[in-house]
Amino acid sequence: MWLWKKSWLAPTLVIIGMLIVWESATMILAMPTWLLPAPTIIAREIITSWSAFQQHFWATTSLAVIGFIVGVSIGLLLALVLHLCPRIRQSIYPILIMSQNIPIIVLAPLLVIWFGFGLFPKIIVITLVCFFPIVIATLAGLGQTNDDLLHYLRMSGASKKQIFLKLELPHSVPSILSGLKISATYSVMGAVISEWLGANRGIGLYMTLAQSSFRTDRVFVAIFFIMLVCMCFFGTILFLEHRVLKGFQKRGRS
């Protein structure tokens, strides 16, 4: 517990210092609120607008969770297929790389044209930004298996299934968890982008309306909650990573 508090002390002090400088700069330079609101104004807007904002918050959070689950499931399945079938990997892997060169903000309007303004195109957008990190991380983890242990299991007559379940998959867990942390934060970004294109609620819609009415304080409110959701997602995966790796360590000792 003491180490956890110590690890968060430095970034907390830095954030507090940045907020003090920000607040002081807006007062000294007499910044208009529509150009750059002070942190105290943003904090006051968070409190006063929460009753109306919470529906947007929960809409984006639930959308990000659904998209994250779908994207990670597809990414893990695809990574396993590519690892177990080298010929398929040689054919599809270059296409995966090229798919990441297409900007989501450009592809998203096409998805709306093809599938409408419902939930399905939003899930596709989030899946596209989530599945690639988990695919790459999983493939990297599966490819980092210890050669000596792999040779030993093969010499012992272990089947491909046994090698995968007993050696390759456990060794890839840290890499998979790293990919999950990246995908978790990307899912929130994908949810907000999908809401820019058309939604009746969500942080992306709230941000768009705030920008059009020059309510910069509300834009910062949206940014604050986007960061909050990302931190919660990242913290959840970090907690699971700690528990899972701790479980593997106990198994290794026993």
Image: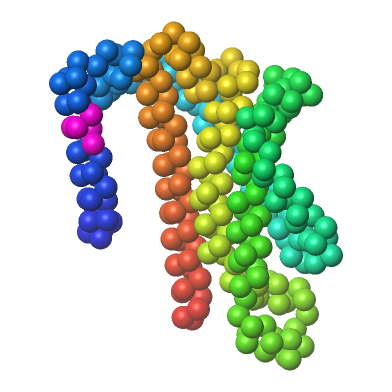
For the rendered model, the colour scheme is rainbow
Q: Residue at x 68, y 38 (%)?
A: 102
Q: Is residue 88 above or below residue 202?
A: below
Q: Residue furthest bottom?
A: 155
Residue 151, percent from left and from top: 69, 87
Is residue 73 in view?
no
Q: Is residue 139 above or below residue 190?
A: below
Q: Main secondary structure of the magenta part?
A: helix
Quarter of the rendering containing residue 130: top right
Relative to 39, 242 lies left or right:
right
Is residue 172 in view?
yes
Quarter of the rendering containing residue 125: top right
Numbered-mark total: 0
Q: Residue at x 60, y 59 (%)?
A: 137
Residue 233, percent from left and from top: 47, 43
Q: Is residue 189 above or below residue 25?
A: below
Q: Residue at x 68, y 71 (%)?
A: 165
Front residue (pair 95, 174): 95
Front residue (pair 65, 221): 221
Magenta segment boundaries in residue numbering = 18-23
